[in-house]
Amino acid sequence: MNVLGLITSPTDPASRFRLLQFMTFLKKQEVLVETWYSSPTKDSSPADWTKKVEEWTSIDPWRTWNVIQNITRLPILLTQFDFDAIWQSRMLLPYLFKADKLIQKPVVFDIDDAIWINEGKTEVADALADSTKVFAGNEYLAEWCRQHNKNTLLIPTTVDIEKYFPLEKQDDFFSVGWIGTPSNFKYLELAAPAIRQLLSQMPGARIVIVSSEAPAFFSFDEKQFVFRKWEAEKENELINQFDVGIMPLPDDEWTRGKCGFKLLQYMACSKPVIASPVGMNEKLLSTGTGLAATNEADWLNALQVMYHDKALREECGTKGRQLVTQHYNASSWSSAIASELKSLIS
């Protein structure tokens, strides 16, 4: 079976862990996935030349850029006939031309966030309704999607445990770790006051931030405040510098749609976690993998408990690795995905 995988970009987290990481596993089950993404990518900003167009025509650069993005998507309409089905990660591009209506192959729509908040309820609902199947990353998302497509399946976000695994820690610091994109710094900032207080009390503690850039609300000194540049091939090594992984979140419609991937990464590396009990996080925490925190006092208390109790850290870390291995292992879930994809042409 040949499947066209439509992704945002090779580095986009949703594309990487909802689709790309399964390609090798699926190939062993005779499902060949070939990926495609538009250039310029969905999240890119207008090129400088669009400002010249605005001077000549008064057309907003973003509108010009959206037109270009849609034009670069049109080859899909011909390429689709080389494949048996299409596996689409989220909403790919603004729907100016409605070209997607011309896709004739079975489509699986993959959703791992409450994307209707940013992309529009009508637009997402239409995309779901036009799809043959929907893969939803958690029950909250699945419930919303089933309103628009009854053929919605719960396919959780998973981790490849051969790529994320525990390594022996190389230093004596107690390292509180966070990994994520700059767009999620606003969530990390929720725990910042408690982190600063912990570090002021415990000279042997530090915060390690892994991202493409450093957040402005911490003053990094490479001692207690440490920044590490994110690299895909070094993710496992970087996470293994942590003693505990954190995932602060507010409780709102968007965060309830999150699939807990940050926690799953930590757990796969046998790291205990501290997280806001929101959405999928609450389910993952309920298995004894770490501590919940809902306010500044909770965060400080949880950090202090983890700092002082090495036995608890080890117990939570072991449970986390077991949980991921048994229920959120990409290799195991690839069989279900292969079966669902093959059913599109059976």
Image (tube, rainbow, N blue to C red):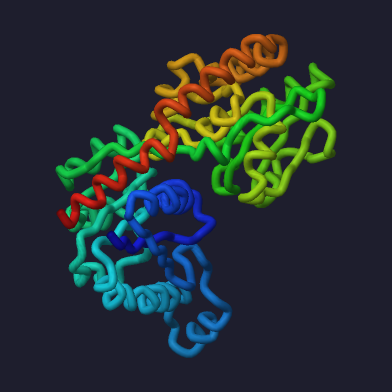
User: How far across and how far down the image is residue 343, in percent?
Assistant: 19, 50
Apparent side of residue 172 relative to residue 313 in the rendered image (left or right)? right
Q: How many marks?
A: 0
Q: Is residue 318 above or below residue 190?
A: above
- The residue located at (55%, 27%) in the rendering is 267
User: How far across and how far down the image is residue 120, in percent?
Assistant: 31, 54
Residue 258 in view, yes or no? no
Residue 18 in view, yes or no? yes
User: How far across and how far down the image is residue 100, in percent?
Assistant: 25, 68
- The residue located at (55%, 76%) in the rendering is 47
Q: In this view, does 314 lie above or below 265?
A: above
Apparent side of residue 145 relative to residue 220 in the rendered image (left or right)? left
| Between 4 and 279, the one nearer to me in the picture | 4
User: On the rendered image, what quadrant is the C terminus found in?
Assistant: bottom left
| Between 133 and 203, the one nearer to me in the picture | 133
User: On the rendered image, what quadrant is the N terminus found in?
Assistant: bottom left
Apparent side of residue 327 relative to residue 218 in the rendered image (left or right)? left
- The residue located at (36%, 38%) in the rendering is 333
Q: Which residue lies furthest to the bottom in this view?
A: 56
